[in-house]
Every structure is written in C-alpha cells, then in structure tokens.
Image (cartoon, rainbow, N blue to C red):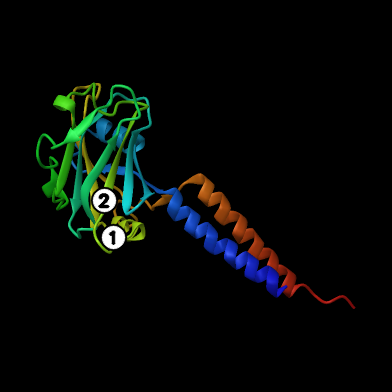
Amino acid sequence: MRALKITLLALVVSCLSASAEAGMQYGFWSISNNSTTNSTAGTNQLKVDVSDAGSGKVKFTFSNTGSKSMSITDIYFDNSVNVLTSLSSIQNPSSGVSFKTGASPNTLPYASNVGFFTSQGLNSESSTITSGVNQGESVGLTMTLASGRSYLDVLNAMASSSLRVGLYVRGFSNGGAESFVNNASNVGGVPIVPEPSSMALAGLAGVGLLFCRRKKTAPTPE
C-alpha cells in the first residue's frame, strides 16, 4: 500500500508538471467597449496559449478561433516586472499572416482604462487587416526570459496581472475596432484554463488518490 501511495503521489506531481509544460490558455476582455457586439465577439474567440519553449524562452500563441469577422493587427506586452527581455522569433503558421516588431499605434489604445503600460509591441505588415490574425488563424511569438526567470515565473506574473498582453483588433463586420487585455485569475473573473490533456492526467491522478483513501477506510472483514 505504501508503495502504491508513493507511486500515485509521483503521478500527481508529474501531472502538475505536465500541465505547466503543455501550456496555459487565457481569454481576453474588452477594455474599450466601443461596441457591445464587437466586444462580446472578441471575448468569445480570441485566445492566447503560453507554453515553455525551452532554452530560456516562452512562446505566446495568439489565435482567432471563431467565425465572426475580426483581425488581430497589433499585439502589445505590459512587462512591468521584467520577466521577459526581447523577442526571439515570430512564427506565422497561417498563410497570409505576417507580423513585425513595432506596433501602430505605438501604445495599446484605451490602455489608460486599465493602467496598461506598453513595453513592447508588434503589428501586422503595413498594419493591414489581411496580414493580421483573421478567423481560424494564429501567430506565435517566442520571447526570451530575463536572467534568473523561469516559465513558472511567467505564469505567476500572468496570474497576478503583473505581466499582461493586449490586442488591438480591427476588421469587425461593422467596421469598428476594439482593444482587449488578457484575462487572469483575478481579472474579469475568468480563471486560467489548463489544456485538456493536462486536465485529463490530473483527473486520473485524483481518481487514484481517491481509490487509495477508500481502500484505507474500507471495513475489515469479520
């Protein structure tokens, strides 16, 4: 029984580690609210996955997961705690998506509404909607960690809102534009969500621990 408990405990630790390595997904909320319809649509379909890229780097993958017309044309970082240093590389996995350093406008519009300080920005080529992240598309940004910082430091900073990412989104069907900032566990009431595979592993470990407890408390046969 003792060996089984140790094995299950190791599984729990492994699951938690796997969850961190697999990445964490965050949603977004509108800080501009120029249009309730546009703000709601953006909240529903804009996501960012933060994963450990290894070799002292972290990858941010921004995706536009729905069918409503909109395009992420500018991406901003509020890196007030200096957990990140510089941009290492840009990955444009979707055809037509193309980003470069230097956002336009330079700072996230409506940033003052939430005290968002732009430390770094990127924009689609020529700030055009066509080269931004449209429906069903994504873009990856690999960032270098600051000296002495780890991937878990990034997750903690995201959870406390000391590290935030913002999006300027254009190309809505009514011609509007909105600004968004990522949700954290204490912003907008939306918790950090582990990827499904990690959740399944954690669930398996939990079932194992429950089995151990039930076995321990089972009555002894007369």
Q: Secondary structure at mark 1?
A: loop
| 16 up-or-down from 95: above or below | below
Label 1 vs label 2: CA separation?
A: 20 Å
Residue plotted at (57% across, 50% down): 200
**Residue closest to the eye, 195 or 147:** 147
Residue plotted at (24% across, 51% down): 164
Quadrant housing residue 220? bottom right
Quadrant location of the C terminus in the rendered image: bottom right
Residue plotted at (57% across, 53% down): 201
Quadrant housing residue 105? top left
**Residue closest to the eye, 146 or 173:** 146
In the image, residue 120 lies at what x, y percent? 16, 45
Dot 1 alpha-carbon crowd within 10 angstroms: few under 14, some 14 to 19, many 20 or more: some
Amino acid type at circle 1 is Ser
Q: How many marks?
A: 2
> Of the residues tagged 1 and 2, which is closer to the observer?
2
In the image, residue 138 lies at what x, y percent? 33, 32
First reached walking from the N terminus: tag 1 or tag 2:
2
Q: What numbered label is drawn on residue 144? A: 2
Dot 2 alpha-carbon crowd within 10 angstroms: few under 14, some 14 to 19, many 20 or more: many
Q: Which residue is mark 1?
A: 160
Compared across the picture, whether 49 is left or right of 19 comes to: left
From where the camera sits, is residue 34 visible?
no
